[in-house]
Amino acid sequence: MWRVLLVYVVPLALTIYALIDCIQTDESEARGLPKPFWVLIILFGWLPGSIAWLVVGRPRRRPAAAPHPPTRPVAPDDDPQFLARLREQQLKKREAELRRREEELRKGRPEGEDPDKR
């Protein structure tokens, strides 16, 4: 069973992988030989052709670039302008509430009474 796996299945899987990788590679990125020759080498060379493609013909993969930071904040709580507007609205609301309470206190107290004598 292991012999069948090692002799037929693994080389077949490697050949299929190399063939798909070669077909999906851009023509200008194939190294060494033109891409059609690499396809023929992989098909007729089976195991040696697949290994040759992976070692010699396959283009070197460039490391993935770091993701670009978003041009604008992702969430509202990350937006400095939003936070500034929110603080300003809260401050105005507190000031209005304070003025309303002060007005209530003035109306509830007799006019001549000093607020500090309480």
Image: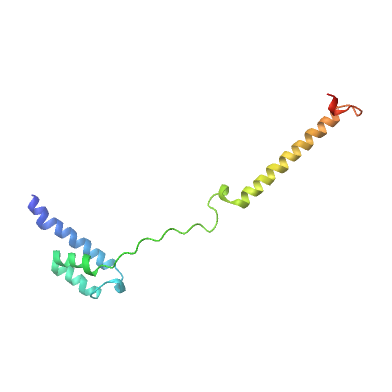
Q: Quadrant of residue 113?
A: top right
Q: Residue at x 55, y 53 (%)?
A: 73
Closest to the observer, 44 or 80:
80
Residue at the bottom extreme? 34
Disc count in the image? 0
- Above or below, 63 against 35 in this view is above
- Above or below, 113 against 52 in this view is above
Find residue 38 and report its horizontal and vertical position in percent: 21, 71
Q: Quadrant of the C terminus?
A: top right
Left or right? Give the position of 63 relative to 31. Answer: right
Find residue 48 and report its horizontal and vertical position in percent: 14, 66
Colour mapping? rainbow
Left or right? Give the position of 107 relative to 33. Answer: right
- Above or below, 46 against 37 in this view is above
Residue at the right extreme? 112
Q: Residue at x 18, y 58 (%)?
A: 13
Find residue 105 and report its horizontal and vertical position in percent: 82, 30
Residue at the top extreme? 118
Q: Residue at x 92, y 28 (%)?
A: 112
Q: Quadrant of residue 47?
A: bottom left
Left or right? Give the position of 21 relative to 86. Answer: left
- Above or below, 101 against 88 in this view is above
Closest to the observer, 41 or 114:
114
Left or right? Give the position of 104 relative to 54. Answer: right
Find residue 66 and report its horizontal and vertical position in percent: 42, 59
Residue at the front extreme? 116
Q: Residue at x 65, y 49 (%)?
A: 84
